[in-house]
Image: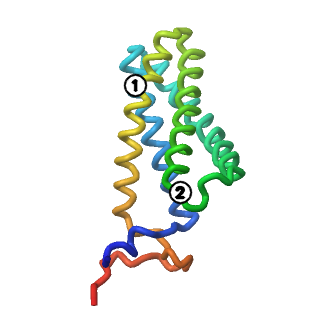
């Protein structure tokens, strides 16, 4: 198919970095909004989101390092591996939000509400973030491993 080649790409380190930063901004804003809606406190919302931005970066790095050692699913089961990796990250990230929210607010009820809501909002926002980045040609590399970024021009079927 003509469009299949564009669906299989790598990305430059800079694209990955910018994409990661943009996700962290979206994720932290979501946490801040949910924290405010649950607690009614702008101070707690900003505190939770600010601390979370730092802890999530460290936790994500650790999560990636652990998954880098897991050989299961690298060949043939790539989709299942991605689902498992995504689910394990959501567990780690939700626990982080719960613990931070509890420490900041002192309320298990508030922490549970924030963390529970976040499961749904983060999945939806991550999906939209990924779909948005799929539209951005900058920093994509060909599947053959070339460092040349894919052109913004669509491929013409011959």
Assign a secondary structure to mark 2.
helix
Write down the residue under mark 2: 78
Q: Position of residue 8 (x, y in %)?
A: 44, 69
Q: Nearer the viewer, residue 78 or 57?
A: 78
Q: Position of residue 128 (x, y in %)?
A: 34, 47
Assign a secondary structure to mark 1.
helix
Q: Position of residue 80 (x, y in %)?
A: 51, 50
Q: Residues within 10 Å of mark 2 (few under 14, many from 20)?
A: few
Q: How many marks?
A: 2
Write down the residue under mark 1: 117
Which residue extends farthest front? 76
From the viewer's perspective, is 70 left or right of 134?
right
Residue at mark 2 to residue at mark 1: CA–CA distance: 29 Å
Residue at 68% x, 54% y is 71
Quadrant in which the C terminus is drawn: bottom left
Residue at 49% x, 19% y is 44
Residue at 51% x, 68% y is 10
Q: Nearer the viewer, residue 94 or 80?
A: 80
Q: Position of residue 126 (x, y in %)?
A: 41, 44
From the viewer's perspective, is 49 left or right of 131?
right
Quadrant in which the N terminus is drawn: bottom left
């Amino acid at each position: 198919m003509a469009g299949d080649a564009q669906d299989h790409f790598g990305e430059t380190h800079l694209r990955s970095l910018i994409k990661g930063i943009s996700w962290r901004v979206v994720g932290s804003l979501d946490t801040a909004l949910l924290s405010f809606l649950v607690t009614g406190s702008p101070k707690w919302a900003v505190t939770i989101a600010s601390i979370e931005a730092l802890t999530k970066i460290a936790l994500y790095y650790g999560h990636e390092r652990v998954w880098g050692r897991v050989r299961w699913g690298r060949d043939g089961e790539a989709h299942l591996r991605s689902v498992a990796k995504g689910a394990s990250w959501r567990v780690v990230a939700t626990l982080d939000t719960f613990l931070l929210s509890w420490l900041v607010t002192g309320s298990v009820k508030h922490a549970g509400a924030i963390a529970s809501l976040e499961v749904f909002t983060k999945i939806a926002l991550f999906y939209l973030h990924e779909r948005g980045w799929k539209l951005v040609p900058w920093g994509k590399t060909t599947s053959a491993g070339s460092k040349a970024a894919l052109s913004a021009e669509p491929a013409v079927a011959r």
